[in-house]
Image (tube, rainbow, N blue to C red):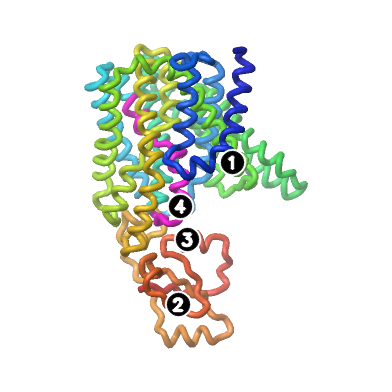
Amino acid sequence: MNDIVAGFALIAIVLLATPLISGLVDRSPLSFAFLFLLLGLAIGEGGLSLIEMDTHSPVLEIVATLTLALVLFLDAVKLQVEELRARWLVPVLVLGPGTIIIITLGAGSISWLIGVPVLLAFMGGAILASTDPVVLRELIRDTRIPRSIRQALRIEAGMNDIVVLPTVLILIAIAGSASSSFGGWSSFLAKLLVLGPALGFAIGGAGSWAMFQIDKKTPIRRELQSLYGLGIVLGAYAAGTAVGGDGFLAAFAAGLAVVLLNQSLCDCFLEYGEVTSEMAMLLSFVLFGIVLSGVLPDAPLWPTLGLAALVIFVIRPLSLGLVLLRAKMSWEARGFISWFGPRGLNSLLLALLVVQANLDDSELLLAVVGLVVLVSTVLHGASATPLTAWYARRIRDSVHEEERESDAAGIFQDHEEGVPRISVDALHQQLSGSAPPVILDVRSRMSYEHDGGRLPGDVRVPADQVTDWARGKKPDRSVVAYCT
């Protein structure tokens, strides 16, 4: 089949099939990631041989590059930095060491089971430490889960690639002997970690500022604003790459600039960007499935399945268990966070970077990562709905520590400050006055379900969602919260 026709056909399949099967996917243990990866495996060289594509295909490289750059940019834009400014070190320091432990244990397992050189094993450990936000997307939006737990998962999915990606790039440079002198390495690291991200930050900040200022004076149509955000992503990637740095880190820095500089992009871009990135991710899964169809036989089956079992059932739970020892949360929450570290598209994209560097055994590494990702998409995709429902039932049946915290930082810190209280009589007097306070019912989910009683005119807001409720509201009335 002609490459252009094949490309159009794959795009058509993704665009047509996604909405048509969405209802089925929502009601089944299957995930879009697994289905489209399976489709690629079926039509590739190892299946029906309808389409052949190797690991150096320009189509795969372009789609994969655009996808990863857009995903990283959106991850940064969606970070709720304003909530983390005062206590950002806590979740970052906790989740950062967790990622490093996973990388180290994963590298040891790959070296032992697959038998690749130590340097390549560490690349594999880093690649398999990356968690996939695609599988976590619906879970993170589910308000039945306490906000602190959802935010911890969101921070990890959005931030751990910023630990993983430089690690992979530096290891690739070491393996390729990109720099042999101290000066050469200093220049390489400066471009990778400073110059590239700085340019991306400048483009993101200046680009969003310019849009905001011009839109105030001469309104810009929403559809053009949607495309403008994509221009920022591509511009940051191109600038970061042009100066010898990394375009992906520059794209993430551009998104971070939008948040840190208190700029804003039209919500139409966020909607457009989400849809575009989702379609690009699903198309990437198909393309990777086609490529993996030809290279999967290179992976030793039982050692790779053993690696998948170690990564999913042992390494992540053990690593997260260690860093969550001091966290104020229930055993159900610890298990929930420890389990949901799915491997997916990000791992495949990072493995592709190793292949494109033409390192020895890089295609073997891609095959091993691909099989682990396939196992992960099955297990995590199938367990997402039932485990979320189980955890939600546990929350309804008893009070959990994590319900009292509105962000991830709260579950790692002790609160020494006192909480001002008001008596029943004083509250009654204020309610009878000319400026009555807003009454928030912040009882735990279990108490709210079983106690029944409510105060007249109160507003039901679970304690972990108070921050979301307060965002954007004018501070023109006092607020009184009550619980049991």
Q: What residue would you read off at disc 2?
A: 454
| Distance CA(mark 2)–CA(mark 4) | 25 Å
Q: What residue would you read off at disc 4?
A: 142
Q: Which residue lies at the image location 55% right of the left edge and 28% below the top edge?
A: 66
Please, what is the dominant secondary structure of the magenta stretch?
helix
| Distance CA(mark 3)–CA(mark 2) | 21 Å
Label 1 packing within 10 angstroms: few (<14), some (14-19), many (20+): many
Q: Earlier in the sequence, mark 1 or mark 2?
A: 1
Tell which of 368 and 237 is nearer to you.
368
Label 2 packing within 10 angstroms: few (<14), some (14-19), many (20+): few
Tag on residue 15? Answer: none
| Distance CA(mark 1)–CA(mark 4) | 31 Å
Circles 3 and 4 in contact, beta carbons < 8 Å? no
Tell which of 196 and 102 is nearer to you.
102
Indicate the amino acid at tag 2: Arg
Q: What residue would you read off at disc 1?
A: 205
